[in-house]
Image (spheres, coloured by chain):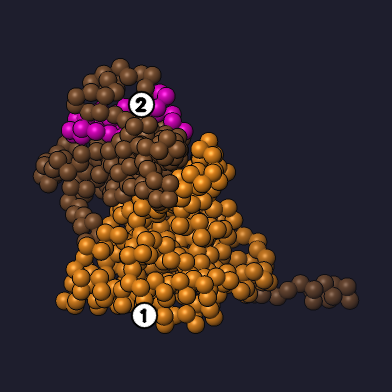
Chain colours: A orange, B brown
Amino acid sequence: MLGTMQFRTHLTASSLRNGITNPASFRAPPLPAIVRKSKSRSGWAAFSAADAPIATFGREERDDARDSISLPPGLRQEALPKHVAFIMDGNGRWAAERELPPSAGHQAGYKTLQLMVELSVKWGIRVLTVFAFSTENWLRPKLEVDFLMTLLETALKDNLQDFLREGIRICIIGDSSKLPKSVQEIAAKLEESTSNNSKLDLLVAISYSGRTDIVQACKKISQKVKNGVLKVEDIDESLVAQELETSCAALYPYPDLLIRTSGELRLSNFLLWEMAYTELYFAQSYWPDFGEKEFVEALFAFQRRQRRFGLRRQTIGVNQP
Amino acid sequence: MKMSAKMENALPPVSKYHQPLLLRLVLGLCWWMVHILFSIQHVVNQILQAVKSYFISILLVQRYWDLQLHKLRSLAIVVDSKEARNTLKVKKLLSWLSRIGVKYVTLYDMEGILKKSLAESQGDLPNGILHKDRMMIELLSFIDSKEGIAKAASFLCNKYLRDELGNCEGKDLSITESDISDTLNVIGFGGPEPDLLLVYGPVRCHLGFPAWRLRYTEIIHMGSLNSMKYGDILTALYEFSKKKQNYGT
């Protein structure tokens, strides 16, 4: 048990270093009471660090809701983000360091994505948005772009049954008109087939740009004004938000946590509108190396961090549980 | 006699009673030791950081001499609204940035505290003015963010209704990124895209800084404004100068 506590405290320090914080802002955990009375059957529980699990002597009583979701020790269901966004960065550099072609990096990155989806379903995260391909990525070498499109097509095709079985709803966001016809067809079929699933919304951003999303929202609004459906006076920020592509995740359209891998510290034109109050977590590892341990560290960091929405919590449409 | 025997039976054996207590004390002691070790490590880290920051601030660390500020056309600073009330610290920060040679600074806090307090006391800012030759200071708040986009959309719709852009009835309306950028400038919500954004406060988010401007901005969390150090700013600017962006290609 002591080992667990030591490990947790180590996690605290290391995950803070991985976030966008400098070591100077790291705070040592508050001194806990040594023991406390708990609801465990044996009557006593040892106290660990602020966010650490309560290690009990004997089985702890848990409610039914918690029983259905098996979380790693120390993560609290109520403190988990409802919507997690990923910028899956570093596939190319991962491959280059191993003297492999970029395609090998993307293949390895795809495996990481599968793991993240699996863990999100397992831990009760409600929405997962992944930046699969940006509008700027079209400028990459044709060979790499073609490979990515083939990988995308294969991934969508091969996972349909898994999505249906696991209750995953797929939503493709971005300018799909630029995608190959075959990818467009599979994406449309997948969205339709999974539309009634509700365990996890998986938003896949392909040929996506945050600015372009805002532009198309303004276009839709203008069209509605032109058609007489809307008055110009009705236009406000909530109306713009409704027309954004992420509104397909109706319950939780705004990410609570953004994880970007490979140590880069920018949003790269991803979900610009939606990320005003998103906790930003920049992990050092490349995307193919980002595993369960790293995901848990990011979630621990999120759990600890102070979230502040300012005065406009109600009006800005921040995810409400 | 019988009563006392019954009472003796009712009491648990001494070892059974003391075992959990002993275990708790041992575990408690171990936890305290672990905590003390980490606290010592934390204090040592803090001291090392302070020493490093001091050496950087007096420019004894050679690599910080040339910051290559040509890459930094515009710097944005987001201050948590609670900390933004400390205008003395903000002014000190601005004077440091002016000394370093930063040309354009965008100051943002959600509630517009800086907008009110600094605009009122322009004379106290570095070199006496808000917009000056050496450093221009732009003050923003939450209303300059998403509201700006909504107003740009309204403006464009009005334009369409006056048929300045949508010439043909049947034609789809064409709005581009540059249309929105131009409109934001026209209606007073425009401005440069910051190359670097420094966040001061407990949060690890940009608190609603104008979304349109954040495409490729590097974001660094600086900790509390109250504990800001000149050396930390130099370090952040140095780290930024070493960054290479490939813009998705």
Q: Is residue B82 above or below residue A291?
A: above
Q: Residue at x 17, y 43 (%)?
A: B71
Relative horizontal placement of residue A255, taking residue B16 as reference (left or right)? left
Magenta region: B90-117
Residue B61 is one of the magenta-drawn residues = no
Q: Which mark is residue A154?
A: 1
> In this view of the protein, can residue B110 be seen by the observer?
no
Q: Amino acid at mark 1?
A: Thr
Question: Going by the picture, which residue comes out furthest to the right?
Answer: B2
Q: Nearer the viewer, residue A8 or B20?
A: A8
The image quarter containing residue A228 is top right
> In this view of the protein, can residue A228 be seen by the observer?
yes
Question: How far from the left and from the top, in percent, is residue A78?
Answer: 58, 60
Q: Residue at x 22, y 28 (%)?
A: B135
Q: Is residue A197 above or below residue B129?
A: below
Residue B98 is one of the magenta-drawn residues = yes
Q: Amino acid at mark 2?
A: Leu
The residue that mark 2 highlights is B88
> Which quadrant of the figure contains the N terminus of chain B?
bottom right
Secondary structure, mark 1, is: helix
Other residues around mark 2 within 10 Å, as few (<14) / some (14–19) / many (≥20)? few
> Which quadrant of the figure contains the C terminus of chain B?
bottom left
